[in-house]
Image (cartoon, rainbow, N blue to C red):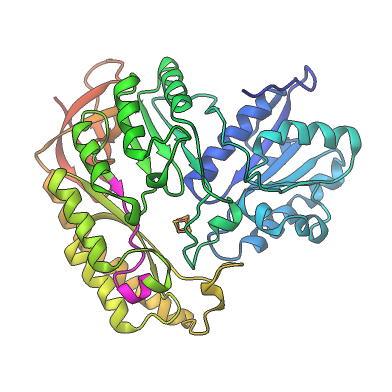
Amino acid sequence: MINVKPLSSKRQGVYISTYGCQMNENDTERMLSLLEMVNYEPVNSPDQASLIIINSCSVREKPVHKVHSEVGRYKELKKNNPDLLIGVGGCVAQQEKTRLLTDIPLLDFVFGTDAIDELPDIVEKLKSSHQKIAKVRFEHQKPYQIQTLVRNPGVSTFVNITKGCDNFCTFCVVPFTRGRERSRALAELVKDVQSLVQRGVKEVTLLGQNVNSYKSACGANFAQLLKTLSRETDIQRIRFTTSHPKDFNEELVQVMFEESEKVMEYIHLPVQSGNSKVLERMNRGYSREEYIQKVKMIFKYLPQAVLSTDIIVGFPGETEEQFQETLSLLDEVPYESLYAFKYSPRPFTKAARFSDQLPEDVKSERLQRLFDKHKSIAQQLSQKYVGKIVQVLVEKTSEGRGIGRSTQNKVVHFPLKGEQELVGKMVDVQVSEAFPQTLRGHLL
Ligand code: SF4
C-alpha cells in the first residue's frame, strides 16, 4: 500500500514525456497517479509545468542523445524559473545512473526503474534540500509488491505481473535496465484485478517482459494465474504480453483453450529470427524448428489464434541465406502483425561486442524486404474476417462511430445506431472491410 502525504494544497503542473514500450507507458501512468496524490496535476506542455520528467527508453537508437537533446530544450524554461525541477526516469536513467547528473547540469534528479514509488519522496526532498538526487539501485531482494495505480482506468487497462528479465538475450539491454525477474503474488493480483473490475474495467492486459515465466511465491505459474483470474474474478477479458517462445508450454495453451471465454486468442510470440544459428547467437533458447512446433501446438488447441511477432534483422554475422530463412518463416507462420527492427548495439550486451557487425545499408535493405513481404501476407490474412461476426468490447464512441477491440485484438470501427450508450459493452459486429490492424463493419 502506498502512503503519501500531500505537499501543499496548491496543485502544481507535471509534464512527463514518455518513450518506448507499453511498460514505460504504464510506468508513466503510475508516476502520474503517485504525483496526483501529492498535489501535482498533469499538464500538456512543459512551459506549464513545475516538474518535468523524461521517462526514457534505451531500446531504440541513440537513447542518451535523445535525453540530452530533450533536456536542452528546457534550458530557457529553467532560466526563467529556477524552481523548475527536471528529472529522468526509465531505462536510460537506470543504465547511465549518476553519470546523467554529471553530464547534464540542468538535471535535478535521476531515478531508476525500481524507484518509481519513491517519486513523491524524491520531489519533496528536492524541494527542501535543493540537492541533486540519484535513486538508481536495484532492489533485487525486495518482493515485487505493488497495486495497479491508474487514474481513469476506462474499459481496458494494463496490470504488471512481473518486472525485469533473467534471459539475457545477447541483443537486449532490459536485464540491465529492469533488473532480475520478480513476480507479484497471485492472491494480490486477484485482489488487484477485482478492484479494477469494481472501477468499471472489463479487460486487463497482463504485462511483463516475459509473462510466461511468471512464478508466484505460492508456486503458481502463468497458466495457473490465467486460470485463477479467469475463474475467481469478474473480469470479462484477459490478454497478456509479452510471451517468450521457450516458456510457452502445452499447459498454458490448454488453459487458454479451457478459459477461452475470457482469455483472448491473440498471442504476441516474438521469434526475432528464422534461422537457428542466429537464434543461438541471440541466446533465445529455441531453434527455428522448436518455434514452429510451438506454433503448431497453439493452432492445435486454438485454431482461431491470431499471432504477431518481433523480428530483428541484420544481427551481427547474419548472412543473406540466414536472412532468407527469416523471410521463409513468414510463409510457415501466419503472422497478422509484425514489429521488425534493424539490429543496433546496446550498452553492456554481449552482441554489441561481436566483431561481425553488419553495415547499415545491408540492415536497411533487409528490413525493407521483410516489410514488403509481410505487407502482402498481412493484407491477404486480413481478408478472412470479411463477412465474419466479431465480438467487440466498445472502448469509445465518437462522431457517430463506435470503436473497440475484437477478441483477436483488431481495432473495430462501426457506425452507431441511434443514441445507445455502448462504451464498456460487448457487441457483435459483422465485418464488411478488413485491413491488417483494423476492421470495419456494422452492429448486429
Ligand atoms: S526475453 Fe530477451 S528480449 Fe525479452 S526482455 Fe528478456 S532479455 Fe530482453
Q: Nearer the viewer, residue 127 or 41?
A: 127
- Residues drawn in magenta: 267-279
Q: Nearer the viewer, residue 14 or 25?
A: 25
The total number of labels drawn is 0
Instruction: Write the residue at 51% across / 70% down.
Output: 344
Q: Position of residue 437 (x, y in %)?
A: 28, 47
Instruction: Write the residue at 61% across / 61% down.
Output: 63
Vertical order, 329 against 93 (above or below) = below
Q: Position of residue 143 (x, y in %)?
A: 58, 36
Is residue 403 visible in the rendered image? The answer is yes
Q: Position of residue 85 (x, y in %)?
A: 79, 41
> Which of the 4 image quadrants contains residue 65?
bottom right
- Residue 333 located within the stretch drawn in magenta: no
Is residue 398 visible in the rendered image? The answer is no
Vertical order, 47 against 168 (above or below) = above
Q: Nearer the viewer, residue 330 or 413?
A: 330
Q: Position of residue 438 (x, y in %)?
A: 26, 44
Instruction: Write the residue at 65% across / 44% down.
Output: 139
> Which of the 4 image quadrants contains residue 174?
bottom right
